[in-house]
Image: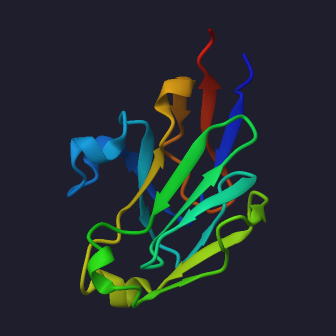
Amino acid sequence: MRPDLELYMPVAGKVIPLEDVNGLLAEDMVGGMGAGIIPSGDIFYSPVSGKVVMVAENLNSVAIATKSGITILIHAGIDTAKLGGRGFCVYVREGDSVTAGDKLLYMDREYVESRAKITTPLIITTPEMVGNVETDYYVNDAFVKFMEIFLAKD
């Protein structure tokens, strides 16, 4: 069975289960669908093609809505909002169309890691639309497919 949507690693790093992301509260997981990434790179790329529907004021997160209606949130680090945007730079604005692989944001890992956690949750914020998610926890390079999403069937 072919997936309805494929996600590519937004940054080089180690993929971990979303529930293993320390500091992420259960209510923040919006249904618990997604994965955590411990980044080894500084630049985050779009894991999917779609429209940018949110760029955080503090520059640490971006949400992308796909044509299928699935929305993906990439939140660079935990407790990084307290940095007020320091250590981050974004390459997109709300309303921009992106293709998988386009630059989304930059995180100065060294700076951020000295002040917060760099573990990055990638969360599917529309879990009601998802039937199943398959994640490859062995992928560690950017631009490699690491997640397949199967939409819920009515």
Q: Which residue corresponds to the image point at 63% horizontal and 63% vertical from the top-left?
A: 142
- Name, please, the residue furthest toward the top: 154
Q: Is residue 78 above or below residue 110?
A: above
Q: Which residue corresponds to the image point at 26% horizontal and 87% vertical from the top-left?
A: 114
Q: Position of residue 151 (x, y in %)?
A: 63, 23
Residue 132 in view of the camera: no
Q: Using the image as rendered, state which of residue 59 and residue 40 is in the foreground.
A: 59
Residue 16 in view of the camera: yes
Q: Position of residue 121 (x, y in %)?
A: 40, 55
Where residue 115 sits, quadrant-wise, is bottom left
Q: Which residue corresponds to the image point at 54% horizontal and 30% vertical from the top-left?
A: 134
Q: Position of residue 31 (x, y in %)?
A: 36, 33
| Chosen colour scheme | rainbow
Where residue 11 sits, quadrant-wise, is bottom right
**Image mark count:** 0
Q: Is residue 56 above or below residue 37?
A: below
Q: Quadrant of the C terminus?
A: top right
Q: Is residue 96 above or below residue 85?
A: above
Horizontal side of residue 56 vs 19, given as left or right: right
Q: Which residue corresponds to the image point at 45% horizontal and 68% vertical from the top-left?
A: 39
Q: Using the image as rendered, state which of residue 26 and residue 132 is in the foreground.
A: 26
Q: Quadrant of the N terminus?
A: top right
Horizontal side of residue 75 vs 44, given as left or right: left
